Amino acid sequence: MITMPEDVLQANEGEVGFSWDGTSPHPVYADATVKNKDTTMNWAEHQRIVCSAGKLLTSWTADEHTGKGKKAFRALKDAYDGSNKQRAVLRVSKGIHQPETNPHLQLRVVETFFNNEDNTSRSVNYTFHLDVSATEITSPGLVDRFQWDGVRFSYEDENNWYRWPVLAVPPRAKNSSASRRASISYASLQTHLNDLAEQEKKRLRQEALDQQKLQAQTLEAKINQELVRLKQEEQVELRRRNNEPSPKFFKGTTKAYVVNKYSKGYYVIWDEKTQKLIKTI
């Protein structure tokens, strides 16, 4: 079963005759070889793509296909969710290749049947394509990047193709948009998004500090203006002794004592509603 990316394995080179990221014989030209992986995506990213593609099979049922196509897709679904007695195992036999024209991975599904009576087994192999589509990244700083995502499983038997899901629009290839230049892994994208989020947090923190500082400066100026008014109208001013007034007075959170020339006076505090210094006890 495949529940996490780590559950996705590589095909046994001894069974398929090549490594998932090496080369294999050209399907047409006998003396030529082709790359099995024609992308910068590493193994961990292939595991992520294959694991995530399992959700495409959620809507598949046995009546969607007939004949060998039904058997193949039943085995594929079993490899993901164990729905058919956990007989099948999926392994990646070729990485992402043909990125410019027909981007896909090659998957090998092996279904094994056991005979408990004579302690024997037999296996049936199915080769699938996992078509991938180039999804554009819209995050700031990544307008020229894209990410591969699995969009369709395909199985061929005697020139008959069985696919799921049936897409109305073909998957987008690497060059289907002029802005696409290089792919980016899920991990790299997440790191980039985390960096952007951290930068935004820092910006908001600094903005809040700047706003608080501005408000404090503005409030202190208003309080000082009120002190000038009190001196002009009531001939009182701040008493300055024994660490008076408190710094909190100019933040509008505590009171201060004002006195006249005879050292008589009263407490005042900033009133946000009236935007004035008012008497208090």
Image (cartoon, grey):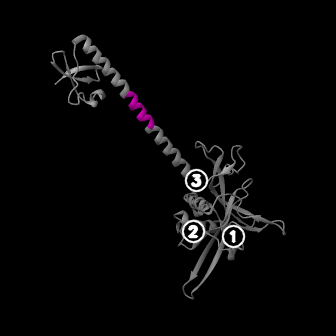
Q: Which residues are magenta?
A: 206-215
Q: Secondary structure at mark 3?
A: helix
Quick check: 199 above or below 60?
Answer: above
Q: Position of residue 44 (x, y in %)?
A: 59, 62
**Residue 59: within the magenta?**
no
Front: mark 2 or 3: 3
Is the residue marked by circle 2 packed among few (<14), some (14-19), or many (20+) residues within 10 Å?
A: many
Is the residue marked by circle 1 packed among few (<14), some (14-19), or many (20+) residues within 10 Å?
A: many
Quick check: 7 above or below 192?
Answer: below
Q: Name the kind of residue labelled 2 in the image.
A: Ala
Which residue corresponds to the image point at 63% horizontal and 80% vertical from the top-left?
122
Q: Quadrant of residue 162?
A: bottom right
Q: Which residue is mark 3?
A: 188
Q: Position of residue 56 (x, y in %)?
A: 58, 57
Of labels 2 and 1, earlier in sequence is 1
Q: Which residue is mark 1?
A: 19
Dot 2 and dot 3 residues touching (CB under 8 Å): no
Q: Is residue 269 left or right of residue 129?
A: left
Q: Name the kind of residue labelled 1 in the image.
A: Ser
Q: Name the kind of residue labelled 3 in the image.
A: Ser
Q: Which residue is mark 2?
A: 79
